[in-house]
Amino acid sequence: MVVGGGPVGLVCALLLENQGYRVRVYESRPDPRRSAALTFGRSISLTLTSRGWRALRSAGVEDHVRRLAFPLRGRTIHLEGGRTQFHAYGPNGESIESVMRDEFVRVLVDAAERRTGIELLFEHRCLGLTPDLERIRFTSAAQTETTISVERVIAADGINSAIRRSFIDTEGFDQSTRYSRHFYRELSLVGPNPDEWPLDPGSLHLWPREDVLLVAFPNQQRRFTGTLFMPMDGPRSFHAVHRPALLQQLFENTFSDLVELTPRRNAEFFGGAPWALGSTTCSPWTFREKIALVGDAAHAMVPFLGQGLNAGLEDVTTLTNTLEELDWNWAEALHAYPDRRKPDCDAVTALAEEHYRELAQESRSPEFVLKKRIEARLIELFPDRFSTPYAVISFTERPYREVHEVAKLQERIVSRLMELPDVADLLGRSSFEEELRAMATPLLWPR
């Protein structure tokens, strides 16, 4: 049984069905193919990187999803005054991919429905476990409550997981939630000509303004889905911007190049309360050798690193690979799975929190531009040895827990080079290559 019919739960069902299991998927929402698109304003754009694509490949749906995806080969930083800077993700055209959540889920539902071993049960909301933790309670669209015996359960029911909540009062269970000071609303960016893109669709677009950040992803309608992150309180905050005239003032002063591209901003901004952001960790992830938490049910994170979906998909590949390695002994696999996976998810949850500083604050500075130039030069000279933390996270499947070591090494080398006088000029000279090699080699290959 899989509880939760979002991307992580559906991919988990596909992977298990590949191995001959019969899987029931319980989802609280209606069938997305027979209902309106997901409500605008929350989690519309998702990012896929190497880890996520691996899971989709194993599930047999990679090609279908790639047809929906927009490859983003770098970030375009929109500075005050209309100036822009483009920072490529890598020297060889590396890209992350953006997909619209509703279209993505529909493709996965179609794939699951085609499998004879998967049964999809929509409008079945999980209420949690019974007090003895032996049965799971569901309520249907007709408000009929049923209970089902717990046998093998994968809980992919999201950040507000009813399964996880059932264990809060049990001995030995620990849960921690850290709320971000930033909340968000989503805004659509629309050009004057509906047949033309208002911005480059091959790039992630950022408007970094210290305590305020706007991020935009392309979508299938030749528009962009923008997400505005702001604190709830303060001079520039959701509480401060409480009427249309103040929103107009915020855009004219902070995002002047977006005034004409956001014609529906009043309706979208004031159309509901801002959504909160937070990180949730818990332990243990498995219970009674029958239940396992995956995705946001096990580890929710803020969206600034774009790894929430990818980490969840890597959870299910780790779980199914562990089952396969242990000859499908569920008791042993559910014991091994958290040990293999939780340290990585704790690491990426912390990294996601830290990444806001780079996106909203550091990316505006001349030092950041210089740092990116140095990194690009080092990658050219040492492609097998030097990498950035973001590249390791997005374009490899190295454990997340190793990223801190990558970051320390990067910082040692780049900081040393940034101390050189006139390093910006030196980077453009071929004669500087040997000096650069001589300085970096001892740090990359320490004795």
Image: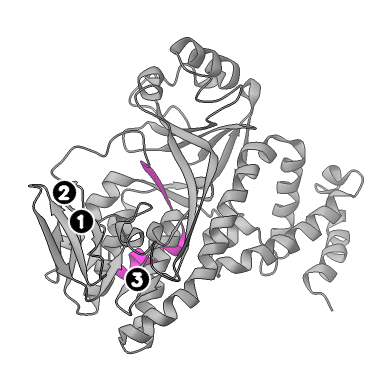
Specify few, some or many for label 2: CA neighbours under 10 Å numbering under 14, 14-19, or 20 or more: some
Q: Residues within 10 Å of mark 3 (few under 14, many from 20)?
A: many
To which residue does mark 3 refer? 292
Q: Amino acid at mark 2?
A: Asp
Q: Is residue 395 above or below residue 398?
A: above
| Frontmost residue, 37 versus 70 | 37
Magenta stretch bounds? 43-60
Residue 409 in the image: x percent, y percent?
Answer: 75, 64
| Mark 3 vs mark 2, CA separation in Å | 25 Å
Q: Which mark is residue 109?
A: 1
Q: Residue at x 58, y 23 (%)?
A: 236
Instruction: Give the side of residue 6 with respect to residue 305, left or right.
Output: left
Q: Amino acid at mark 3?
A: Ala
On screen, residue 447 versus residue 68, left or right, reads right
Q: Are marks 1 and 2 in contact (CB under 8 Å)?
A: yes
Q: Residue 393 versus residue 292: which sits nearer the camera?
A: 292
